[in-house]
Image: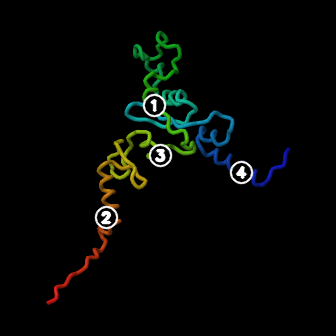
Amino acid sequence: MGNMSRRGFLGRSTALAAAAMMPIPKAMALVAQSTPSLQWFAVGTDEFLYPYLATSMENAVAQYATEYGRTVGDECPECGDASCFEHNDDLDAALPWIKDNGFAFDSDLPVDRDPSLAEWIKAGCNVPCEACDYGEPTECRMFEGKALCEECLQIARTDRLDRIVGTAPGTPINQPRWHLSS
């Protein structure tokens, strides 16, 4: 057995401990160096997209189809029947429309964390506003590190301008006092 330095031992054991606490695809990306490179994909319906870590769009679509019951075995695209062998050879295949709703995120996105709201916005998706309680995805813009809808964006811009000028609520107004002298 070869000599192992203390630094090498600590590095490998730390990587294995960190990998044990992560979901399996993320752990595989950290530990195994010879696997195909993983990338983030967004797959779902025309209303809601979900992030999937996979080696290809086909793998991400297959994960989504299995997880949400969107396979041809659950619903035949031709006749609508479940388990239809007349129109389908592979009942585990994803429904054909799923791939049309998906896309690949930027390939430089780190695999050790889910895509952030900023990365969803950059990809052209609607996200929930982080300032109001509406909760539904809407067209948001990033401002000072938060995804904000149009109304909250205007409020945040006004608050920022007030802070810069010094007229924020609670800030004393330092106006010169003019005295008329006779």
Give the residue at mark 2.
Answer: 162
Depth-wise, is mark 2 or mark 4 nearer the camera?
2
Choose the circle earlier in sequence order: 2 or 4.
Answer: 4
Cα–Cα gap, marks 4 and 1? 37 Å
Residue sitting nearer the eye, 117 or 176: 176
Depth-wise, is mark 2 or mark 3 nearer the camera?
2
Quarter holding the C terminus? bottom left
The quadrant where residue 112 appears: top right
Give the residue at mark 4.
Answer: 11
Image check: 22 left or right of 77?
A: right
What's the mark number on residue 102? 1
Quarter holding the N terminus? top right
> Are there few (<14), some (14-19), or many (20+) residues within 10 Å of tag 1?
many
Q: Percent from the top left, x then y, of residue 104?
A: 50, 34
Q: Secondary structure at mark 3?
A: loop
Give the residue at mark 3.
Answer: 116
Depth-wise, is mark 1 or mark 2 nearer the camera?
2
Instruction: Give the residue at the far left of this rendering.
Output: 182
Q: Percent from the top left, x then y, of residue 170?
A: 30, 70
Q: Residue at x 60, y 38 (%)?
A: 24
Q: Amino acid at mark 3?
A: Ser
Instruction: Give the residue at the far top of this rendering.
Output: 86
Contact between marks 4 and 3 (CB within 8 A): the answer is: no
Residue 84, above or below 40: above
